[in-house]
Each structure stands twice: as C-alpha cells, then as structure tokens.
Image (tube, helix red, strand yellow):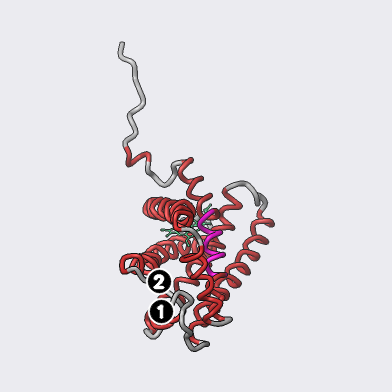
Amino acid sequence: MSVQTAPKAGWREWLKGDNYTLHKLHSLTGIFPVGYYLVQHLFFNSFAAMGPKYFNAVVYFFNVILPKPVLYAMELLLVILPLLFHALYGFVITYHGKANIYRYRFSENLAYTLQRISGVYIFFFLLYHVYSTSISHKLYGTDIYYAGMQAQFQNPWIVAVYALGVIASSYHLFNGVWNFCIRWGITVGEGAQRALHRWCMVGFILLAVLGLIALAGFFMHEPVPSPGH
Ligand code: HEM
C-alpha cells in the first residue's frame, strides 16, 4: 500500500500573496519602521520652510556629525532592508490580488486599488529620489544641501513628481494604518472601522500638507552657503 503525502509546495506557492507570516511581516514593516521613517523624514524636510540654514543643519547633522557607521547601520536596518522587503512583497500581493466589486462597497474597492497603485508609484518615485539625493552624492563624494534641492526643483516636472510622491506616500501610509488595525484585530466592529477611516483620512491630509510645505520651502528663500563649505 502506498502512503499519500501532500504535494511539495514550490517557491511560487510559498511566495503567494496569502502567506500568513510574510503578510503579517509586510503589514508590520509598513508601520514600523517604514511608516515611522516617512513621518520623521517629512517632518525634518519641512525645516526647509523655516529657511536654508535650518534645512542645512539637519543635513549636516546626519551627514557630518553622526558617525558614519551609525548612519549606515541606521540606513540599512531601519530604512533599506525593511522598505525593500515591504516593497517587493507588496508587488507579490499586488500581483495576486483582485478587487471584488460584488462583495465590497465601491469605496472599499477604491481604497484597495489606490493602496496598490500608490505603492507601485512610490516604489519608482523612491528609486529616483534615493538616487538623486543620496546614491549619486555618495558616488561623487558630494552632499546635498538646500541649494542643491532648490536647483533640482527648477524643473516643474520634478516638482510634480515630488508632489505626487508626497501625496501618494501619505495616502498609502494612512490607508495602511486603517488596514493594519483591521488585520491585527484592533478595530473589529463596523462602527469602529468607519470612525477610524475618517481619522486616517485626516492623518493623510495632515501628512500630505506637511510634505507639501517641505516642497514649498524650496521656493520661499534664497540659498545660503552650506555649513560644510
Ligand atoms: C513610503 C513607503 C511605504 C509605506 C510607509 C508603506 C506603508 C504601508 C502600510 C502601513 C500598509 C498597511 C499594512 C496592512 O495592510 O496591514 C501597507 C500596505 C501595502 N503596501 Fe506599503 N508602504 C510603503 C511602500 C510600498 C511600496 C513601495 C509598495 C510596492 C508595491 C507597497 C505595497 C503595499 C501593498 C500592496 C499593501 C497592501 C497589503 C494588503 O492589503 O494586504 N508599499 N503599506
């Protein structure tokens, strides 16, 4: 008599968007550290609105005062690795998912679709953003200060790409907070979920405004020499 064993799951099966552990880790990394980093990043960049010397002081702190091993360890562990995991598994979820217009309301399907579209846009935006503000400077041994950012924003297309990047990231994070609370059983009842959705949309607008203030900050002042020179 032959013994029947379960068919071996290949890596394609294992990577499906419904892998419980990976999905939970994806959800968690979206809030911490990636979501947390996004909020503090937009906050520090909004110093541009107060003036070049405030913005330059932040860049100076991270690029000059903070010891390089600490900076690189923080960048790797708190930003690059969690974001890469969240983004790549996000593509897996997007690839396997489908909106269900029969089971869910229009607004829920819209939120589901926007979460995925914004994720894909953020991914390509971040490739450009990280290259132009960080990798290219590391390659050529330079640092970006207020004047450098201001020079980039002379191109209106770049301003539009950034404005959309800020709005898409803010929406993605706060719609994500709403999803997160449902997924982890924090908001269970329909009333609680509706109320939280409203608060999350307020959070989305506030964070988007903070990011747009940062962007506007580069049109408000004349550049001053960077503290590094
Ligand atoms: C600024 C960067 C990002 C932040 C702050 C962020 C944050 C979040 C948060 C908080 C969630 C909710 C987690 C949950 O559903 O429990 C989420 C979900 C999601 N993220 Fe991101 N994310 C970012 C970038 C990306 C990128 C680049 C992609 C690439 C496609 C992506 C794809 C997704 C997808 C598909 C979901 C929905 C998961 C689901 O419904 O099960 N995210 N994100």
Q: State which quarter of the image contains the C terminus.
A: bottom left
Q: Which residues are magenta?
A: 33-43
Q: Position of residue 43 (x, y in %)?
A: 57, 70
- Mark 1 closeness class: few <14, some 14–19, many ≥20 residues within 10 Å: some
Asked if the magenta segment contains residue 225, the reply would be no
Per the model, the C-alpha gap separating discs 2 and 1 is: 9 Å
Is residue 48 shown left or right of residue 158?
A: right
Say if 117 sits above or below 226 in the image. Answer: above
Q: Main secondary structure of the magenta part?
A: helix
Ligand 1 is within 8 Å of the C-beta of the residue at disc 1? no
Q: Position of residue 223 (x, y in %)?
A: 47, 85
Q: Is residue 105 visible?
A: no
Q: Position of residue 93 (x, y in %)?
A: 41, 51
Say if 163 sits above or below 34 in the image. Answer: below
- In primary-sequence order, the first of circles 2 and 1 is 2
What's the residue type where badge 2 is placed?
Answer: Asp
Residue tagged by mark 2?
143
Asked if the magenta segment contains residue 40, the reply would be yes
- Mark 2 closeness class: few <14, some 14–19, many ≥20 residues within 10 Å: some
Residue tagged by mark 1?
148
Q: Residue at x 62, y 46 (%)?
A: 185
Q: Nearer the viewer, residue 5 or 118?
A: 118
What's the residue type where badge 1 is placed?
Answer: Gly
Say if 197 sits above or below 12 in the image. Answer: below
Q: Residue at x 44, y 65 (%)?
A: 118
Q: Nearer the viewer, residue 3 or 105?
A: 3
Which mark, by number, is residue 160? Answer: none
Q: Secondary structure at mark 2?
A: loop
